[in-house]
Image: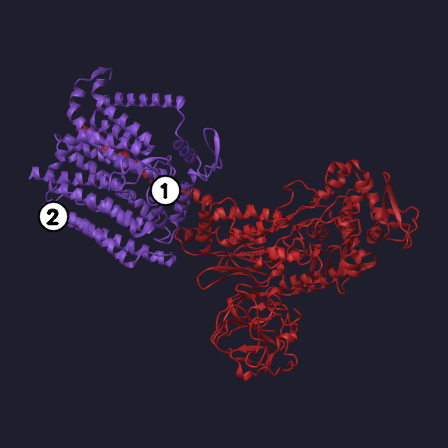
Amino acid sequence: MRLENRLWNLGNLFVIGLVLLSARMVYWPLVRGVELDPSAVALGTARRYSDSIKEEAATNQQAVDEIIGGSAIGDLPQPVVQRIKDLMDAITRGSVFDRNGRALVYDIEGESGDRTRFYAEPSLAHVIGYVSGLRSGVSGLELTYNETLLGLDRLDSKLNQLIHQEIQGGDLVLTIDTFLQRQAEEALGSKAGAIVVLDAASGAVLAMASAPGFDPNRVLEPGYIQGLEDDCGGAPECSGVFLNRATQALYTPGSTFKTVVLLAALDSGQVTPGTIFEFGPLIPGPQGGYYIYEVDGGVIPDPNHAEDRLDLEMSYAKSANAAFARIGDEMASEVLIDYAARFWFSAPAGSFPPFEIEVTPPLLANDLNEISRNNLLRASTAIGQGEILANPFALAMVVLAIVNEGDLPVPYFVEEIRSPDGDVIQSQPGRDIVQNLISPETAAIAKEMMETVVERGSGVNAAVSGMTVGGKTGTAQLGGDQLPHAWFIGFAETADRSVVISVVLENAGEGHEIAAPVFSRIADVAINQLGRPVGEVTGQLGSPQDPPEENQAGTATDLPVPDILRDPGKIDIVDGPGTCLGNYEGFPGSGEFSWPVAPEHRSLVGGDFIPGHPGIDLGAPTGAPVYAADSGVVVFANWSGVGYGNTVVLDHGNGYRTLYAHLSQIGTYCGAQVEAGATIGLADNTGNSSGPHLHFEIRVPNGFLNPWDHLPTP
Amino acid sequence: MICRQDISDRRIEARLLALTSLIVLSGFLLVAAGLRVRLVQNPPAWTSAFLFPIVFSVVFFSIHLLLRMRRVTHEQVLLPLTALVCGIGLITVYRLLGSAGVWQQLGRGLLPGLLVVAALILRPNSVEKIRRLAIPLSVVGLALSFATAFFGIVDETGARLALKIGPLPPMQTSEVLKIALIIFLAWFIEREGREVAGRARPAGWLRLPAVRYFIPAGLFVSMGTIALVQMADFGAVIILGVIFFGMIYAGFETRIFTPIALTGLVLALLVGVVLFLTWELPTVIRFRFLAFLDPWSEMMLTIGGEPIGVTVSQGPGYQIQQGIYGIIAGGLTGTGLGLGTPEYIPLAHSDFIFAAILEEMGFVIGVPILIVFVAILLRLLRLAAVLPEEQAFERLLLTGIAIHLFTQLLIMVGGTLNLIPVTGVTIPFLSLGGMALLINISEIGIAIALVRRLEMTSA
């Protein structure tokens, strides 16, 4: 029986060997799958390349195109990239909503199951970010919450992935108020700069505007970003469009930094509110002369006031450079460094909780030792000049700590993370609080002084009737013949609401002239918006204005479109297939129209406005975004049975409607409230069309208007 | 052991074969459909998706009918299990290479192999004649190997694995060498085993056999090894060694096996050390070992100290990476036939076929395939156990065959799963391969023929 025993042993060996193989087989997906999974590789790569995009953006546009487009995803071989693509194609990324439930970002599924990420609110491009060609987040919240949006942090998605089912990502509800955001964007106008609006009670970011911006729907277009920057020959107001100037830019803060110095001096007992500063002889000059502060052979000019002695409160209110240069000069360098670090200036790494989007920490000086050695540098730093650099976000946090009695509620963007079923998975994941940055007494004194600035100091332009406003102006001198950066940081509050706002406008002029009025305007809107119950959409549709004059080009009877009936009391009701039913309240139109296509597509390629063709055919190529010509509500969003292909109709609530036809993808939905300039779809040649173009109509109750008469000059 | 009342007309086998045919048919149809869903250019024609499963069923059912005609009643699972594994291999080859690959697999491996099986069933006593083939086949095997080593076709990795003789398709001659060694050792142990054991000198508990008995076998193995090293077929070297030690283990008691194994190990170590000191490790082995340690390594590869501009992850690691990505993409249920991307895996149709199977069919098929292999192997061992003791040659032959199949499976699936360094051998029954498949199927044929002969003698 010797051989039988041997065979028995061999049999056992075979079984053990194959069990080992099975174990190894399961090992790869279950143990190593987490790190080697194509999705994990995609996430890692996205993270790795988000930084290099920022670096490359200025110099190498082609590299950016390749990285975002996913054609050069690092050193990964093409098959790996393909596997990642395959995986990503099975995922519907979660949507992003504003605090009122307005959809800001969502996936649109094409006919062949391909998905396109759609950004309805390009003004939030710097906050929300955008995704790469592989549909993985590259920047902003799209990057920070990449796994959440892809659903890969949920167990049920993991299981779905295991059995190759489609995955639905989680949704984000932001603290952003879109109406306020648009107002902030508008307030910046054509200037480069940034505005941060925070809810002072919680730290929630209500708006964060950064100009110049970009359209995330178009970042994948080769040369798009370069085109934006080339448009004005590299002037600051159109360079660095990827940069979120609110959080990532570094500007000389100017006098706004006196607020930090004030806090340091008060909190450390160096000065009291009653401290009097006397200023030396007046140096004669063109506008009545100025005072100076001399230190170590250097001279700091103080042209901000005429008085030869001021107490601390009025020195701050009038932004007296000589007073603060003296405070800085006399302040122990450790005290300055310590208090600056409390507000994150040159703070040691990790001393602040992580923020939800990319933030560049502000800088006190290039070399902190120099602050102790060089009295002139310290004095200059104390008035916000010298080597000091900051961004509106960092300075907003200073004000936030003052308003909150010395505690800092860390600004956050995400109110809720929701599962695809709408259940709240997590609330305010980025919320945090840093305690006792300064004593409550110091905070209270500083707050009062900030109010004085607006009452009778340099910030009178920031006042808003009906609310308590405090703040600090700043005018960052840049040297040479550059105009200074205009700053204003401050707060506005009523009995139950308060907001903190920080404004910077690049090379725009004096803070009190330029930035303070912007603050005032935004503060008014922000307090109002904060008073609305969450979920209420801003702007009620009024009754139709006087119907605009009818154009003879067409009449209502020969409409080759879905029968759109008008309810004179309210707004359009669209009747027929594709009709939108439901709530039609939303943004009212302004009555002025903007172009529905990008500048380079604003030429006629097909029919002009003639009888029988009640619109104009604009030369938008396939895939070019189509923008809402005015704010309004979607009353039709579907395939049109009468040759228009995929069609969107907006009712602007003021008697006008606009129609956009032959789209490849409809980027909006029935009842959606869209604001002027929001992307509502992509152009194509669907329906009865001989080539890619956008058919655009402006309608009134009785017919059509010639769009050429109502659009701005191309 | 053999139960008479089992079955009379091989009903179980018929049913299992019918089931296998159904699985193969659905596999082919799913491949054809899946490739169309993926909008692949030139998907295989629907007719081929029906034709090949029919050919497959017909040939296996022919063997089944042959067994019934010859009134063989036992061993009803070996054939269907083999058919199942062959069928899954065929589906995967169809998925990756289309009809051309299937024709090659059928024409050069499966059909000739089944002809050998049919011949063995018709004349079960021909197994006797195999014994007489031991010496000639060994000589032929060695001669072919040396011929390949010097005149073979050089493949893209620089190895010479196949020999082309006249109009015949290229032959992987190392397969002949493996089966020759199995037959040679079975013959040798049967003939000399008793004498070796009887004349062994006691040394404590151990018993040392006389060296001269092992000169023929040792000569065979070392000659074969030299030829295979020259061919750069290191997988076959390992298989040859494992077959040698495995069969010695099966053929002798521990007291004799241990000194032989120890001597072998010491000799191998000595040779290894000498080689290590005097002879640079062949590039292929060094690269594959580096790739085994970390397929993702960014280390630059060198030849003779000179960097060749390729990192481990771009070179030898790439295949393993792709295999692993495929396995992860497949997960539990696989991506579905025709719906994955196993074409990214280099050599997915031969060496790395198991990765391709796991990608598109998942563990739910991958683990059962291994279980089927275990069943086949245990079935062979069981047959070896029930054969009468005087048929030592046949018993050792079956043992050797089981060891051969197991080693080949372990080495290649282990390589695919990065459990051991990759060596370029095929997976029995699954991989695309002419000579290898022919010999693997013939080995199963030997087992079935032995069952028939056993029934004939005991009837």
Quadrant of the drawing holding the N terminus of chain A: top left
Quadrant for residue B322, please give it: top left
Task: Look at the image and tell me whether residue B115 can be seen.
Answer: yes
In depth, the one of B205 and A426 nearer the eye is B205
Picture coordinates of residue A562 (x, y %)? 50, 78
Which chain is rendered purple in the image?
A: B
Residue visible at 60% across and 59% down in the picture: A215
Residue visible at 39% across and 32% down in the picture: B285
How many residues crowd mark 1 within 10 Å: few (<14), some (14–19), many (20+)? many
- Which mark is on residue B68? 2
- Which mark is on residue A101? none
- State the CA–CA distance, disc 1 to disc 2: 39 Å
Which structural element holds mark 1? helix
Picture coordinates of residue B136 (x, y %)? 18, 30
How many residues crowd mark 2 within 10 Å: few (<14), some (14–19), many (20+)? some
Circle 1 residue? A25
Which structural element holds mark 2? helix
Q: Specify the amino acid type for callout 1.
A: Met
- Label 2 marks which chain's residue? B
- Label 1 marks which chain's residue? A
Note whether A47 is above or below A640 in the view shown.
above
Residue visible at 63% across and 72% down in the picture: A588
